[in-house]
Structure formats: structure tokens, C-alpha cells
Image (tube, helix red, strand yellow):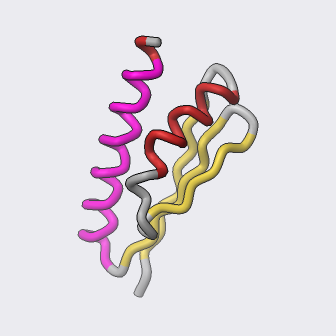
Amino acid sequence: MKVRCELSFEYPSKRVASTVLKATKVDDQGFVTSSVKEKSIHAIIEAESVSSLIHTLDDYLSCVSVAEQVVNKS
């Protein structure tokens, strides 16, 4: 059984969303499918188990948080 989580992050501009996406895309490595649509990042995480999904989600959210902090300091 596969489990799936869909996320959406809205930003003040498409430029900010694209910058955060670019910073996090490196770590996706087949675990996360993400894209920018207007001012938002849309991400889909799929895993084989709930525990694996939670682990990937935790890693992804940490990466997004760091990228947002860096963008906000610019």
C-alpha cells in the first residue's frame, strides 16, 4: 500500500516560491515531486508506509524551513 501527502506553500511572490523550490529540489531525489504554480509550491510525497512518509515529510519540511529562513534574510 502506498501512502501520499500533498502540500501547498504560498509565498508573497512567484520569485520567492521559485527560490525556495530551487533550494529544496536538490533533496527531492525521487521522494518528493514539487513544482511552482503562481506564488505557491505544490509538493507530493509518496511512500510505502506511514512511518516512511512521516520521515520523508519531516526531512522535507526541515529543508523548506531552512530555505524560507535564508530567503527571508535576503
Q: Is residue 60 above or below residue 44?
A: above
Q: Is residue 21 above or below residue 66?
A: below
Find the magenta span and give its range. 49-71
Position of residue 35 in the picture relative to residue 70 (left or right): right
Position of residue 50 in the picture relative to residue 74 (left or right): left
Residue shown at the point (69%, 29%) measured from the top left: 14
Residue shown at the point (47%, 61%) measured from the top left: 32
User: Could you tell me residue 60's position as x and y percent?
Assistant: 36, 50
The N terminus: image quadrant:
bottom left
What predominant SS class does the magenta segment belong to?
helix
Position of residue 24 in the picture relative to residue 16 (left or right): left
User: Could you tell me residue 39's position as x and y percent?
Assistant: 69, 32
Residue 51 highlighted magenta (yes or no): yes
User: Could you tell me residue 8's position as x and y percent?
Assistant: 57, 44
Residue shown at the point (60%, 42%) measured from the top left: 41
Which residue in the rendered view is the most extreme toward the bottom? 1
User: Could you tell me residue 62's position as x and y percent?
Assistant: 30, 41
Which residue in the rendered view is the most extreme toward the right? 38
Residue 65 location, quadrant = top left
Q: Is residue 55 above or below residue 47?
A: above
Q: How many marks?
A: 0
Q: Is residue 58 above or below residue 51?
A: above
Residue shown at the point (35%, 42%) measured from the top left: 63
Residue 17 location, quadrant = top right
Residue 43 highlighted magenta (yes or no): no
